[in-house]
Amino acid sequence: MNTEAGAEEGPRPVASVIALLTWYDKARRKLPWRALPGEAADPWAVLVSEIMLQQTTVATVRSRFTPFLQRFPTPSALAAASMDEVLHAWQGLGYYRRARALKACAEAVVAIHGGVVPGDLPALLDLPGLGPYTARAVAAIAFNRMAVPVDANVARVLGRVIALELPPARAARTLQAAADTLADPIRPGDVAQALMELGALVCSPKVPSCLICPLQSDCRGFASGEPERYPGRPEVKERGARFAVMFLLEDPNGAFLFRQRPATGLLAGMIELPSTPWQAEPPDAPQVRDAAPIDAAWQEVPGEILHQFTHLDLSMRLMRARITASSPPGIWMPPEGFSTLALPTLTVRLLRHAGIWPEAGSKRSR
Ligand code: SF4
């Protein structure tokens, strides 16, 4: 346990580790990637879960983690898979760049560490696809190393405890220093998970539940009477707006035309419907005609679909046509085969909008 005599033996903890761990022992959720008390964590499972949990909710990861791990139970299994297989298994988790990062990481684990996830922080930091947060999280949770990772949830908790006026992105060192004062030599993994859990369950962004919080007596944000004010907010950037028309072309066998996105950039390598470029103004009739995969009797499927990425809103219209003869080149797939394609959510939404998603209105086919 951390020393109380911080003045002589290191920085004084910003909060009580005992109170934090006592709360965690009672409040911790059972999650598929989390080892039960007394169990050893699987480093690969921890690593996969931490990458999945970046920018994706626990609820979404919860339903997708176990099938993914069953399919790729080891770094070697993932390294040996094709990128298409990995992207397909990643469906529904969004931010597909992480799937590529995870594959690159698995390949490095195989090439450099014989397929075994390394346990020390410098080796983890050297792996492609692992940033400082994920490397620290794996070191602490999977290997009980003295490291306290700071993600957005932990930054919020600690930012409130120390009443940080700056936005977290501008105070990364201050937050990491505050986190490091909580590093515990006996239960480092539990400290890391307790802080994450506190951010998720108690110290919520808008209405923190300070009255049940184990850190209340140490929290300067709570003492101020306005904990929600901390940490400071980043300047709000304006979201971009883009417009596109997508094309749904069906051949006489009931197959539909898809194409693969470029290997870099947004939704890299994913499979999508042909479309106009995504542009700042709604495409006009000549632009739509030029972008159509074939000259055909295109009919608009009524309605507009708005898809939100983190940095932009994409407004889409959908045109549909049938051909009777010569098929333009591309990926042709009937609805029963859609689940074999690495389709991003926006394409699934378009197919549902057209009423041809095989499990329309309910679950994804996996
Ligand atoms: Fe967050 Fe309130 Fe706990 Fe402070 S006391 S860490 S503001 S929940």
Image (cartoon, rainbow, N blue to C red):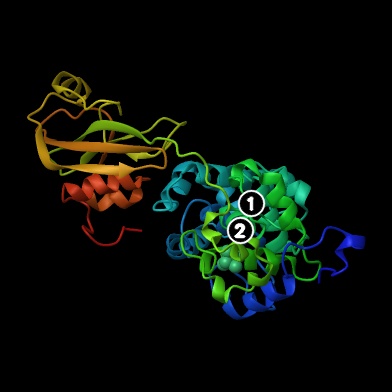
> Are the two marked residues, 1 and 2, in contact with CB atoms closer than 8 angstroms?
yes
Ligand 1 within 8 angstroms of badge 2 C-beta: yes
In the rendered image, residue 198, in percent from the top left (x then y), is placed at 58, 67
Which residue is at the far front?
224
In the rendered image, the vertical position of residue 24 relative to residue 56, given as above or below: below
Q: Residue drawn at (10%, 27%), measured in percent from left and top?
A: 296
Q: Residues within 10 Å of mark 2 (few under 14, many from 20)?
A: many
Measure the C-alpha gap from mark 1 to mark 2.
Answer: 6 Å
Circle 2 sits on which residue?
160
Disc 2 on helix, strand or loop? Answer: helix
Question: Residue 164's mark?
Answer: 1
Amino acid on which the number 2 mark rests in the picture: Arg
Quadrant location of the N terminus? bottom right
Q: Residue drawn at (47%, 54%), measured in percent from left and top?
A: 56
Amino acid on which the number 1 mark rests in the picture: Leu
- Viewer-side residue, 42 vs 204: 204
Q: Residue drawn at (59%, 73%), measured in percent from left and top?
A: 213
Quadrant location of the C terminus? bottom left
Compared across the picture, whether 11 is left or right of 67 comes to right
- Viewer-side residue, 149 vs 288: 149
In the rendered image, residue 82, in percent from the top left (x then y), is placed at 49, 43
Q: Is residue 305 visible?
A: yes
Q: Quadrant of residue 7?
A: bottom right
